[in-house]
Amino acid sequence: MLSYESPPATAAAARTPLRVWIGLTIAVVLDVPVQLIWKALMIKYRDPDRGPKYHSADHSISWMFHNHHQGMLAWFVWQQARWFLRELRTWALMSLFACQFFDWIWVLGNADLSFAQPFTALSYVVVSTCAVLFFHEHLSPLRMAGIAAILFGVILVGSSEHKTTDIELPILKEPT
Amino acid sequence: MTPPAHSSDRLIGVLILFASVISEALGQFAFKRGASRGPVTGDGPSIGPFAAIWKNFRWILLGFAGFIVDGLLWSATLFYLDITVAHPLGSIVFVVVALFSRFFLREHLSPRRWIGIGCILIGATVVAFN
């Protein structure tokens, strides 16, 4: 019989270990090149001169689908995929995704999901800061207030206990 | 390609957005389960992160599936809704992930953490609206 009793929710450690902070910092920092390269890739894809020769702006995918040109549709999708596969930016993006994945698994292995996930909101703050610093965008007072609220919320979450216990979930429990 | 302009499209867009948020929360939940390295069988020693990925690869695959579906549904959302509407609504993912953590992962969410998540929700909405 599987037992469905969960252990009492007690605070395991008061201090958040350094490895969790390092992992969260890497997660937030990696998000910036991901966003920038993704955006640059999509800009190049949409550009008639630099994008694929047969483009979805000129050839309607839904038209091919509804007129039963399935072969043409498959060929067309393959043309798009081939363009992406030949782009260095795609591979840079994939490498960054892999780094993000391993870093995130590392963080989740050491902290609660409800502790770690709110930190991803910091990418709003980092992107806004980059936009002001590098693209000289204007920062409105309301936007500044929003960033302050995010920072305050992240500080509150960060100062809560990082891990409930070594949670033993019912499905993983050994039969007794 | 211009977005369709029917009044029901906003409702469809919001429904797809909620589905996208749920699948993202599911992906996060599955990754958390995949990352579990505690003594999952009795009092055995804790294993490393790579061993955890190997051991829990079904959860990891479910996590990838969740994020891929999330990406597709988010693209569909942006087709039906303006980004000025979609982005603030999308920040409810912080609350949904907190609820998943509370009820499916049995994590202990202190009042301080709930207030922090509330502040982030408000802040993300304000930033996205501008």
Image (tube, rainbow, N blue to C red):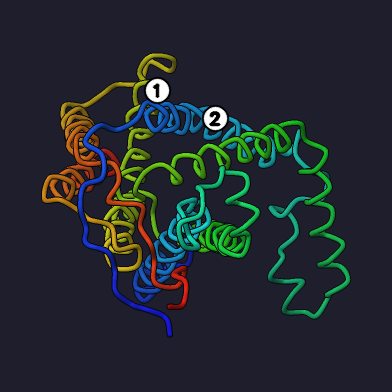
Asked where in the image residue A147 lies, by quadrant, the reply is top left
Above-or-below relation of B113 to A174 = above
Q: Which chain is home to disc 1? A: A
Q: What's the amino acid at mark 1?
A: Ala
Asked where in the image residue A67 lies, by quadrant, the reply is bottom right
Q: What residue do we see at 40% from left, 66% from top? A: B22
Above-or-below relation of A108 to A60 = above
Q: Residue A131: give its label.
A: 1
Please indicate whether residue A60 sits to the left or right of residue A123 in the image. Answer: right
Please indicate whether residue B47 sits to the left or right of residue A8 in the image. Answer: right
Q: Residue B63: give its label.
A: none
Q: Does dot 1 land on a helix, a strand or a loop?
A: helix
Frontmost residue, B85 versus A85: A85
Frontmost residue, B83 versus A36: A36
Above-or-below relation of B128 to B77 = above
* Image quarter (top left, top right, bottom left or bottom right) of the N terminus of chain A: bottom left
Where residue A99 appears, as percent x and y from the top left, is: 60, 35
Q: What residue do we see at 36% from left, 76% from top? A: B8
Please indicate whether residue A67 sits to the left or right of residue B17 in the image. Answer: right
Please indicate whether residue B24 sits to the left or right of residue B122 in the image. Answer: right
Frontmost residue, A108 versus A47: A108
Identity of the residue furthest to the bottom in this view: A1
Mark 1, other Cα within 10 Å: few <14 / some 14–19 / many ≥20: some
Q: Which is nearer the N-term, disc 2 or disc 1?
A: 2
Q: Residue A36: give its label.
A: 2
* Image quarter (top left, top right, bottom left or bottom right) of the C terminus of chain A: bottom left
Q: What residue do we see at 54% from left, 30% from top? A: A36
Where residue A65 appears, as percent x and y from the top left, is: 74, 75
